Image (spheres, grey):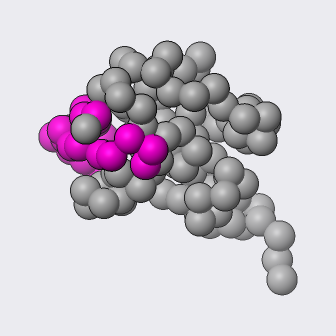
Amino acid sequence: MPRIRVLPHASLCPKGAELEGNAGTSICDALLENHIEIEHACEKQAACTTCHVIVREGFDSLAPAAEKEEDMLDKAWGLEATSRLSCQARLAAEDLVIEIPKYTINHEREGGGNKK
């Protein structure tokens, strides 16, 4: 069972965390199952960047990002070469170290989403 070390985040996980997840589970679901309330405004459909994480260790163990994820990542705050949408990146056998960026871009919350 792969382990995820979450680096400290001021509001979501001030002391950092160590957790386990099942291979094949998304990073987002593993975080949520362990009471780390990462945003996921699009309900995990790769249609926003609120669940953006930076994979500090273990990045190469993840399957490559699909084109839809790559397109969304271009809009993420603080994009790095090892950035992933946590709703799309699925745990493999290798342990991960992740960082949740300080900021997210949430167009709905900030008034930029489509109004119905």
**Which stretch did the figure color magenta?**
2-25
The image quadrant where one finds the C terminus is: bottom right
> What x and y, as percent, mark residue 87?
54, 49
* 42 to 60, vertically: above or below: below
> What x and y, as percent, mark residue 79?
61, 27
Q: Nearer the viewer, residue 14 or 89?
A: 89
* 26 to 80, vertically: above or below: below
The image quadrant where one finds the N terminus is: top left
Residue sitting at 61 percent across and 35 percent down? 77
> What x and y, as percent, mark residue 65?
66, 31
Residue sitting at 23 percent across and 43 percent down? 20
> What x and y, as percent, mark residue 30?
35, 51
The majority secondary structure of the magenta stretch comes to loop
Residue sitting at 48 percent across and 57 percent down? 39
Q: Nearer the viewer, residue 83 or 30?
A: 30
Q: Quadrant of residue 106?
A: bottom right
Q: Residue furthest bottom?
A: 116
From where the camera sits, is residue 102 visible? no
Taking 100 as reference, is 83 left or right?
Answer: right
* 33 to 18, vertically: above or below: below
Residue sitting at 39 percent across and 19 percent down? 58
Q: Nearer the viewer, residue 36 or 96?
A: 96
* 5 to 58, vertically: above or below: below
Taking 22 as reference, is 113 left or right?
Answer: right
Determine if the magenta segment contains residue 17: yes
From where the camera sits, is residue 24 visible? yes
Taking 7 as reference, is 92 left or right?
Answer: right
